[in-house]
Image (cartoon, rainbow, N blue to C red):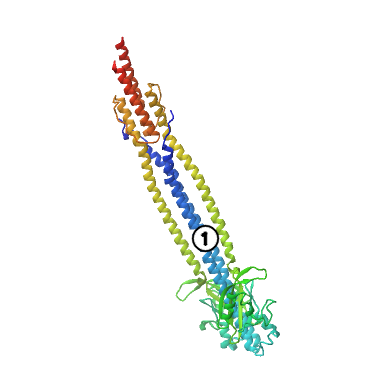
Amino acid sequence: MAKKGQVAFGLLPRLLIAIILISFIPLIGGGIFYYLNIQKLSKISINEMNKEIRVASEKIIKEKAKGVAKELSIYFKTYPYIEIKFNQIKDNEEIKKIAIQKVGETGYTAVHDIKGICYFHVNPKIVGFDLHKLASKLPAFWKILEKSLKGPADGFYKWKDADGKIRDKYMACVPVKGTPLVVAATTYLDEFYKPIYDIKKKVNLLQAHLIRYFLIVFAITILFVIIFGVLFATNVSRPIFHLADVADKISMGDLEAKIDVKSSDEIGIFAEALIRMQASLKAAIKRLKGR
Amino acid sequence: MKRKIRFPLLAKMLIMTLFVSLIPLGMMSFMAYNGINYLTNNIVNVGTITLDDLGKKYIKEKAETVARQLEIYLKAHPEVKPENILNFSELKDIAIQKVGETGFTCLYDVNGIIFLHPQREMTKGFNLRALSKKFPIWWRIIEKSFKEPTGGEYLWKDPDGKIRKKYMYSVPVGDTPFRLGATTYIREFSSPLERIQSIIKTQSISILTIVFIIFALFFIFALVFSFLFARWVAKPITELTDIADRIALGDFSGTITVKRKDEIGMLSESLSRMQESLKVAIERLRAKKRRKRI
């Protein structure tokens, strides 16, 4: 008798291997490919955006330094009798107003001279301070300042805030024409990068969404594989078991075994052939037994 | 014996392939495509807004600093009057400065009369109101600037006939009736984005091309695979059908070549046993009949 146990390596496991080949492997491969590429694409575009925003913000800060330097230079030109000495001008409110201006939302301009003495600063404690003393404490900051003693200079440095947080700052230094003074405009870069943070957030969200969607697709596929795999395998193997059973019964001499296959594929055709065979055998045996 | 099969195994196999492989892969590709589009649009949109904003900040900064420079100069030179303003070349150098690559600053007063302007056709005494009909949005900004610091976008028709977007920021020069306007083409600031956009575009096109190629190859692979698998199941069954048909015609000589470990192998073994036993049974009956006749 035909029993399921006789089948060593059935259609269903074979079919499942095939499905894994044509379904899971490309799906997983495709998912990883898409994800990595989208990640790469977002990284590239965010980097490029970062660059452009940095260039644009540097331009603004530089422009500020240039503008203040020009204002000061016009001021000293129109009042040639003012001696540009620390003690002479440090308390001049008019000059102070020009020298200390806001840069962006979080920055200020300041003025020092080519000897490194601070003339004007938003923090009154620093006024009169010799900036050389910062050389060892803030090397990156000092590097820009040192260069500014000889000409225009700009660059990035890390600044430790009062609350202990270290943040990126940018400084642009422009000499004041006709004077020993240098204008330094400096500000935190965070304020310019705010939109980038928003994009980054969106991109991360998109990536998280994509992973979730991919997993959903994968889950649906597994469901499909189970439904269709089982459906297909049983649709094929059940009638085969039944027909094998019938063939075995016929071998035992039972020509009356009922063939119950309602399939419209090749197996159905085979079942029809068996029914015909049964009928013709019955007729033949009847004829032979008849006389 | 060929018979028409209404719903062959191949069709079943193809439907299954469609559901377990092509549809999910298509869904995934569609999501990835949408994701790339979303990403591109977002980066480009936010990027344009951000860079335009920075550009506007820059223009505002320029207008304010030039106005302050003028204020310092005018304070120290009370002899400067609207009538003799052209005599002070230093003032002219302050009032007309470059803004970015394509822009400039200019000086006019609260009546809309131009004093200093880099363009030759805008000579001293030119009344800006003359252009109010031609550039109404621009004129609204100018008009508002008579009262307060104002910034705004407007469209400007260049001598070459092309209309371009510009941005202007205008501030009062101290307490004087003078107004300092800084203006430039907006494109100057967001044009770096075109480079980023083209980078993204090339990148995403290459991703989508690879995706398309993979998908096409995979489609062919899945079709061939379904075809082979369906044939692998159907072929032995067709062979068995042939055997059964021959038995129906009384021919027991057919040999079954199918040798497999699955359900089909089992079926062919059963059929082969059946053929053998039928052959024996029929032969016995025939022999009996022959004996009876004798």
Tell which subunit mark 1 falls on: B
Quarter of the image where one finds residue A8: top left
* In front of the other: B270 or A177: B270
The amino acid type of the residue labelled 1 equals Thr
Quarter of the image where one finds residue A12: top left
Q: Position of residue B109 (x, y in %)?
A: 62, 84
* In front of the other: A237 or B71: A237
Q: Which residue is mark 1?
A: B40
From this view, report whether residue B71 is shown above or below residue A229.
below
From this view, report whether residue A203 is shown above or below residue B275.
below
Quarter of the image where one finds residue A254: top left
* In front of the other: B164 or B204: B164
Q: Position of residue A41 (x, y in %)?
A: 52, 58
Q: Position of residue B161 (x, y in %)?
A: 66, 68
Q: Look at the image and tell me whether residue A176 can be seen.
A: no
Q: Name the quarter where the N terminus of chain A is drawn.
A: top left
From this view, report whether residue B77 is shown above or below residue A261.
below
Q: Across the whole image, how many numbered discs are drawn on residues?
A: 1
Q: Look at the image and tell me whether residue A124 can be seen.
A: yes
Residue positioned most to the front: B133
Of helix, strand and loop, which one carries label 1?
helix
Residue positioned most to the top: B294
Q: Residue at x 43, y 58 (%)?
A: A209
Horizontal arrangement in the rendering, residue B61 relative to residue A194 (left or right): right
Q: Residues within 10 Å of mark 1 (few under 14, many from 20)?
A: some
Horizontal arrangement in the rendering, residue A135 relative to residue A178 (left or right): left
Q: Name the quarter where the C terminus of chain A is drawn.
A: top left
Q: Position of residue A56 (x, y in %)?
A: 57, 70
